[in-house]
Image (spheres, helix red, strand yellow):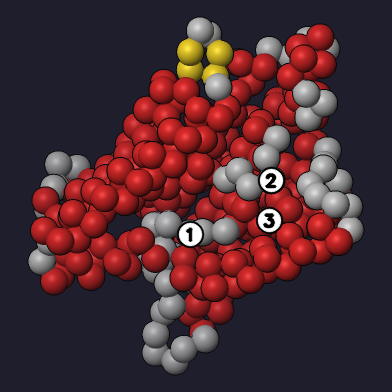
Amino acid sequence: MRFPRVVMALLVGSALAVGGALMQGVFGNPLAEPGIVGVSAGAAAAACIVIVLGLTVLGSWTLVAGAFLGGLVATAVVYATARQGGRTEVVTLVLTGIAVNAVAGAVMALMTFLGTNQTREEIVFWQLGSLNASRWAEVGVAAPVILVCLALTVVVARPLDLLSLGEKPARHLGVDVERLRIGVIVMVAILTSAAVAFTGIIAFVGLVVPHVIRMIAGPGHRILLPASALCGAVLLLYADTIARTAVPYADLPIGLLTSLIGGPFFFYLIRRMRRGAGGWS
């Protein structure tokens, strides 16, 4: 009975961690994470709409499909807005992601206001994240999508290493920077949407895990990406175990737990990096 939940924890943890590593690599920013392009907020807003309106177009899969499509649509809006003259403006993309997150937050607040007590409770627990509803049917849908995207990261590892030298040097070394950005953003959107659609919002995994791996193994993406997948999977598995057992006869929301632990730990990482190397490299 618990094994599907274990497998889902491994899949979601690896997806979120690799998504964070990809975002940090393609934008050259240590604070980049999947949520920066609005994918998590878009998925949450769509899920809230499905819950409040009681949509059942696809039966029990309506909520999952709505959240998945919401994440992809939010990412598409952010990317289309940031793209101009055949290039993607990174600053515009980040600012647009902030705006999309704000709009999605307003949609979630509106749905919470319009909903009944039952739907409000469902919205709150969905936003906090949980692996409690994981079954083999959900694992069977999430696993192929996440595993294929994780396998494709092998293709972008070397170009991301070259991009870390700067856009112009990367272009001179044969990297199509724009195509690389498009491919990475699409991969991150699919990975995060697939994870969020089944578990709700789980924070800080995609932000903290790549930092830890980078401090241990260095910035090379050939090691960073698979190591982030492994560390993210193990981290979320242990976090879910704590969520199941910390409080007797209760199941803590795993998103709440990762935020409570990940937030202070991230402050510690920032202070350590500033005292040591002077920043992120």
Q: Amino acid at mark 3?
A: Val
Identified at 60% across, 72% down, the residue is 261
Let me know if residue 43 appears in the view.
no
Say left or right for 273 vs 30.
Answer: right
Please tell me in which quadrant of the rendered image residue 177 appears: top right
Disc on res. 53: none
Location of mark 2 (residue): 30
The residue wearing badge 3 is 209
Near-viewer residue (216 or 62): 216
As helix, strand or loop, the secondary structure at mark 3 comes to helix
Front of the two marks 1 and 2: 2
Tell me what residue is drawn at x 50 percent, y 77 percent: 243
Query: How many angstroms separate mark 1 from mark 2 (CA)?
Result: 19 Å
Q: Earlier in the sequence, mark 1 or mark 2?
A: 2
Q: Which residue is mark 1?
A: 202
Tell me whether circle 3 and circle 1 mark residues in contact (CB < 8 Å).
no
Q: The N terminus is located in which quarter?
A: bottom left
